[in-house]
Image: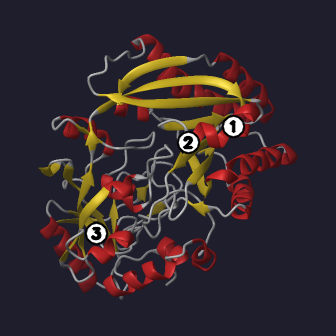
């Protein structure tokens, strides 16, 4: 293994900072095991760092920081089962899976995360028939606190799968992940502005009647931008957006001009409502047919802070209306849109969609703004509706009040006690959300 002096680490959103004593760059599972044994010998915690795209301190440590970026790429293919190195970034998957005419079944709109980081925090996309990325995990390999390799699959330690798929980094270091992939496909995407109240009134039907549905609502406006994606066979002729129009819609507007809007909103908050309304009027309907990755993802270059809550799917309209009322009542000027998505129920113990079909409401603030007051109010509303926080996004919850939200919370803690009784993989965040 490669041992280096630690240096200051910051996440993408600049919301978390840590100062590890040591940095280890591992190039094999054996080197990962060696790093874990080194940390134990030094009585230091060890945490894996991926792309840094979590908004919480879930990857932060003052002990040993472990970089597994070299553990990437396709390790094995067996039909539609693809084994990937834990450090493989999601943006690598179109090319890697495309060589085998396969695709990721579903994904979110950011593709910078590593596969291990994405499943460990419960990253998801949208689609009433599709779960988060962790639901596609058929097997994985962990390096345990003892520094040994543990295979978790339907035939090996199968009882650990519901815990290990969304493990928060608390059970060990993931070295590889086997995904159940879908046959390659393209998607027909339709984006259009619609009246917000009409979308909310028809939420359940809209969310469940198509393959992938989501919408964005800019505070201080009456409109929602809906996105409806329909899966189509891989040989369907593609009709991507013209490059110039795509640059305007995906780069100039949401990244180039948007950062100016955010900065203006900080300097002159009163300009935010009219600018949001102007932006809504400039949005036009567009339709494209393109590869799954091109449709699922969008570039996100303006840094922000995010909180996302998972609610029973039927609670979404009332919760969003309550958030809107809170924004108005408090006079907040919010430049970033609220994002609303849906996902299928699953049985992974710490999945935010465990046991129930789920709707997601995500709120954002520009990274130079203090999100605390806004996020605390949104969290209070979400909790009134049975909400569960996304593990990789900002929230204020603790183990005591998270336990009732997850029927298998204590089952997960018991697995943690078994695999890491000395808390080799602990940090302040895990102590807060899981207990000491």
Residue 417 in the figure: left or right of residue 357: left
State whether residue 404 appears in this view: yes
State which mark lies toward you, 3 or 2.
2
Q: Secondary structure at mark 1?
A: loop
Mark 3 and mark 2 in contact? Answer it, CB < 8 Å: no
Crowding near the residue tagged with mark 3, few <14, some 14–19, many ≥20 C-alpha atoms within 10 Å = many
Q: CA distance from mark 3 to mark 2?
A: 36 Å
Residue 238 in the figure: left or right of residue 401: left
Q: CA distance from mark 2 to mark 1?
A: 10 Å
User: Residue drawn at (56%, 37%), measured in percent from left and top?
Assistant: 214
Horizontal and vertical percent position of residue 13 = 51, 49
State whether residue 87 appears in this view: no
Q: Quadrant of the N terminus?
A: bottom left
Residue 115 in the figure: left or right of residue 121: left
- Compare marks 3 and 1 and give the one earlier in the sequence: 3
Location of mark 2 (residue): 208
Location of mark 3 (residue): 173
- Between 131 and 417, the one nearer to me in the picture: 131
Crowding near the residue tagged with mark 1, few <14, some 14–19, many ≥20 C-alpha atoms within 10 Å = few
- Judge whether 146 appears above or below 14 on screen: below
Horizontal and vertical percent position of residue 204 = 64, 43
Location of mark 1 (residue): 202
- Compare marks 2 and 1 and give the one earlier in the sequence: 1
Residue 295 in the figure: left or right of residue 394: left
User: Residue drawn at (68%, 25%), measured in percent from left and top?
Assistant: 194
């Amino acid at each position: 293994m490669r041992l280096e002096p630690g240096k200051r680490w910051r996440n993408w959103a600049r919301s978390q900072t840590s100062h590890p004593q040591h940095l280890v760059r591992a190039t094999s599972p054996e080197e990962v095991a060696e790093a874990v044994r080194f940390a134990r010998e030094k009585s230091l915690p060890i945490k894996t760092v991926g792309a840094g795209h979590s908004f919480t301190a879930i990857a932060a440590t003052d002990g040993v920081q472990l970089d597994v970026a070299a553990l990437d790429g396709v390790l094995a293919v067996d039909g539609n089962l693809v084994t990937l190195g834990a450090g493989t970034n999601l943006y690598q998957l179109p090319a890697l899976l495309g060589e085998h005419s396969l695709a990721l079944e579903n994904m979110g709109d950011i593709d910078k995360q590593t596969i291990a980081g994405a499943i460990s925090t419960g990253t998801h996309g949208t689609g009433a028939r599709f779960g988060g990325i962790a639901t596609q995990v058929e097997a994985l390999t962990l390096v345990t606190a003892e520094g040994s390799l543990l295979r978790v699959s339907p035939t090996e330690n199968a009882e650990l799968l519901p815990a290990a798929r969304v493990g928060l980094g608390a059970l060990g270091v993931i070295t590889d992940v086997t995904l159940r992939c879908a046959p390659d496909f393209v998607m027909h995407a339709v984006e259009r502005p619609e009246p917000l109240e009409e979308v909310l009134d028809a939420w359940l039907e809209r969310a469940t009647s198509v393959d992938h549905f989501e919408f964005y609502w800019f505070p201080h406006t009456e409109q929602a931008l809906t996105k409806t994606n329909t899966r189509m066979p891989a040989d369907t002729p593609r009709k991507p957006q013209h490059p110039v129009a795509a640059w305007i819609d995906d780069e100039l507007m949401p990244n180039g001009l948007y950062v100016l809007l955010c900065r203006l909103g900080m300097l002159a908050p009163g300009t935010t409502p009219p600018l949001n309304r102007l932006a809504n009027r400039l949005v036009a309907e567009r339709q494209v047919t393109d590869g799954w990755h091109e449709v699922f993802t969008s570039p996100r270059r303006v840094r922000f802070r995010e909180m996302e809550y998972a609610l029973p799917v039927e609670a979404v309209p009332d919760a969003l209306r309550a958030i809107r009322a809170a924004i108005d009542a408090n006079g907040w000027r919010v430049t970033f849109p609220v994002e609303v998505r849906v996902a299928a129920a699953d049985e992974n113990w710490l999945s935010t969609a465990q046991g129930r079909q789920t709707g997601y409401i995500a709120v954002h603030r520009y990274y130079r703004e203090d999100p605390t007051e806004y996020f605390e109010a949104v969290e209070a509303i979400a909790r009134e509706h049975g909400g569960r926080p996304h593990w990789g996004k900002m929230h204020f919850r603790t183990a005591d009040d998270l336990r009732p939200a997850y029927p298998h919370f204590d089952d997960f803690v018991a697995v943690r006690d078994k695999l890491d009784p000395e808390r080799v993989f602990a940090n302040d965040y895990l102590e807060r959300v899981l207990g000491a």
